[in-house]
Image (spheres, helix red, strand yellow):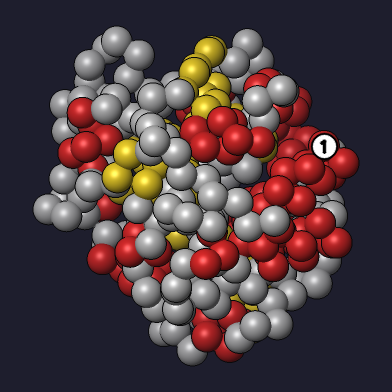
Amino acid sequence: MRWKRRRLLYRSWKRRNEINLISGGQIPSDGVLVFSTMRNEMLRLPHWLDHYRALGVTHFLVVDNGSDDGTTDYLTAQPDVSVWTTDHSYKASRFGVDWLTCLQREHGHGRWCLTVDADELLVYPDDKRRDLNALTAHLDNDGRRAFGCLMLDLYPKGPVGKASYEAGDDPLSILRWFDADNYRAQLHRVFGNLWIQGGVRDRLFFGSQPERAPTLNKTPLVKWNSGFAYVTSTHQILPRRLNDVFDTGQGDRVSGVLLHTKFLPNIGAKSQEELSRGQHFENSDLYKPYYAALIDDPDLWCDASVTYTGPDQLVNLGLMSRGNW
């Protein structure tokens, strides 16, 4: 694992010149930093920024991968956002991880760093009362350097493309439902993380190949060290000890949920673009039926779907834990 981590750090270092700073760059010396790679996310971006500002984020470091929908201009106009751009391959950069590793090594060492996509909204117990600075102080006091989350797919009722949504709206105004009880977990034998699968995508799109269903465990919030490296998105990280983030009986570990807002009305157009670009998965052929199903404007809702009401509900359902927080 030590040599694997070194190889990952080396390959990210080789790609340091693929990203170019176009605005910002003056990073505050304290507070939580957000790192993200995105492309054409103007529909989500206003609410996404407001959500994380409300949680107390100090600054956003964003790599824009060739957006042409106004995302780049919008980001560069924000005083608390630093923007790097690149036209290089998202897939070849390990889906943006190499680019973000460069920024985390340069700007995140010794800092709490939150790595999230534009379609992920972090929630955790008491988040309306205690912000990320309080959460990271709690983690520091407990001697923890990482914080785990389940990625929870939210969806509308009825055909996805028929919902009404505009930039700046709260995605939760239409993405109000989720699958509550079809999750499974096992200990990953290589990286030691709790490997979680399930949810609506597993139910509808991967029934015949459940082992291929999307991975839902993430470790997005880490007190960074320049020697750390994500392996696959934020699903696994090295050193291995950082993957030990979930309460599996200890009763003392707080965790969160990343509300996944993928299924907005533009999902059909985004899926068509992802199919044509072939940049989002190692095995693109495996996911062609999945994308084709999304392009056909499916109804993801079922009689067992549960209406989302907030973090307390997710604690009660066992989808995140309060621990000693």
Residue closer to the observer: 222 or 176: 176
Location of residue 156 with respect to 136 vertically, above or below? below
Location of residue 229 with respect to 90 vertically, above or below? above
Total numbered circles:
1
The quarter of the rendered structure image containing the C terminus is top left
The quarter of the rendered structure image containing the N terminus is top right
Instruction: Specify the amino acid type for callout 1.
Output: Leu
Q: Quadrant of residue 223?
A: top left
Residue closer to the observer: 249 or 280: 280
Q: Is residue 229 visible?
A: no
Q: Is residue 86 left or right of residue 299?
A: right
> Element at badge 1?
helix
Name the spot of residue 320 as percent of width and height, x first: 31, 31
Residue position for label 1: 286
Name the spot of residue 124 as percent of width and height, x first: 27, 43
Residue occupying the point 69% across, 77% down: 67
Residue closer to the observer: 16 or 219: 219
Location of residue 237 with respect to 28 vertically, above or below? above
Name the spot of residue 187 as percent of width and height, x first: 54, 13
- The local crowd at label 1, few if under 14, some if 14 to 19, many if 20 or more residues have their Cα within 10 Å, is few
Toward the left, the furthest residue is 129
Q: Is residue 318 left or right of residue 161?
A: left
Residue occupying the point 48% across, 28% down: 242
Residue occupying the point 45% across, 78% down: 166
Name the spot of residue 92 as percent of width and height, x first: 83, 52
Residue occupying the point 49% across, 18% down: 184
Q: Is residue 178 visible?
A: yes
